[in-house]
Image: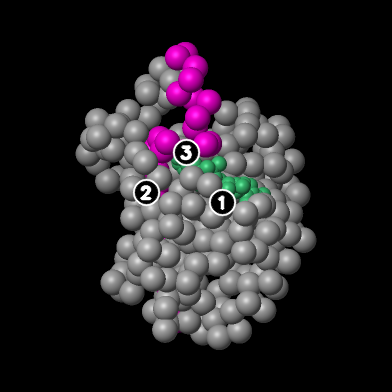
Amino acid sequence: MARRTIVTGSASGIGRATADLLRARGEQVIGVDLRDAEVRADLGTPAGRRDAVESLAAALPDGVDSVVACAGIAAQEPATVAVNYFGTTALLAGLRPLLARGTDPRAALVASITATSALDEATVAACLDGDEERAVACAAEAAPYEIYPSSKAALARWVRRTCLAPGWADAGIPLNAVGPGVVRTPMTDGLFSDPARKAAMDEAVPMPLNGYAGPETVAAALAWLTSPENTHVTGQLLFVDGGAEVALRGEGLR
Ligand code: NAI
């Protein structure tokens, strides 16, 4: 039977490239997005997430084999926390029972190199407490440029916290994140057309190895993390960033 995979953010960019890659490998992909997807849902709201989980459970009564959560936005506004953190974690938690019925079940999400940037600890703490209202309120008080990194750092920590919790490692389900550097997608289009913003981005995210990535590069990493070949990698944030994380943080691991 073809491997059954759910991909969020499947209408564009990294999610679309992932869906295309997995379909080309013969997998059955069920996309979730605001538009142009098998399941249309707004993952920025509790009701949208609930509807998405219900629709997916109805469409996949025998379970799902992998979930790849790519949907996200980069706006410097509090709603970014709702979409990026809660839209990802609530969906993955809601789909875990479906994964538990799958074959070689795997899950992965998309964090970012910015998980290592300046962030707002209050927002991150509220996210990890699962308190969406407080997280959005904290984000409204944070510096706007800290909101997106906070949502992504919280995701990376959630992966580490959750991967060994009951129902994940003990059920044979690896849970990982990728941390892309700058990827050429509709999300970053505006950065390339503005020389000042491009210069700032190049300084913030230096990519000595092969420069900006295409979405298919990140898709390949997500495809491996969620493939049956991945039997022992869990809780990791795999930077797919042309060396940016090493350039910024150096050789030490602690
Ligand atoms: P994109 O804008 O091309 O695609 C994002 C997709 O998510 C779109 O199809 C959009 O409709 C969907 N989406 C947004 N809000 C949603 C919601 N409320 N409910 C359901 N779907 C929603 O962006 P891209 O670049 O493909 O981004 C994918 C992920 O990669 C995001 O989580 C982003 O933060 C992350 N990322 C992107 C980087 C880049 O340089 N492009 C770098 C690091 C991380």
Secondary element under disc 3, as helix, strand or loop, is: loop
Q: Residue at x 62, y 34 (%)?
A: 75
- Label 2 CB-ligand 1 distance < 8 A: no
Q: Residue at x 28, y 72 (%)?
A: 229
Q: Which mark is residue 216?
A: 2
Quadrant including the N terminus: bottom left
- Label 1 CB-ligand 1 distance < 8 A: yes
Secondary element under disc 1, as helix, strand or loop, is: loop
Q: Name the amino acid type tagged 1.
A: Ala
- Label 3 CB-ligand 1 distance < 8 A: yes
* Side (left or right) of 251 relative to 199: left
* Side (left or right) of 250 relative to 1: left
Quadrant including the C terminus: top left
State the image coordinates of residue 233 (x, y, percent, origin top left).
Answer: 32, 66
Residue at label 1? 11
Residue projecting furthest to the top = 196
* Side (left or right) of 152 relative to 126: left
Residue at label 3? 185
In three-dimensional space, the C-alpha distance between marks 3 and 2, rounded to whole angstroms, equals 10 Å
State the image coordinates of residue 226 (x, y, percent, origin top left).
Answer: 39, 66
State the image coordinates of residue 147 (x, y, percent, origin top left).
Answer: 60, 36
Q: Quadrant of ligand 1?
A: top right
Q: Name the amino acid type tagged 2.
A: Glu
Q: Residue at x 34, y 33 (%)?
A: 212
Q: Is residue 120 magenta?
A: no
Sequence-wise, the earlier of marks 1 and 2 is 1
In magenta, the rendered stretch is 170-196
Residue 89 vs 152, above or below: the answer is: below
Q: Residue at x 42, y 71 (%)?
A: 27
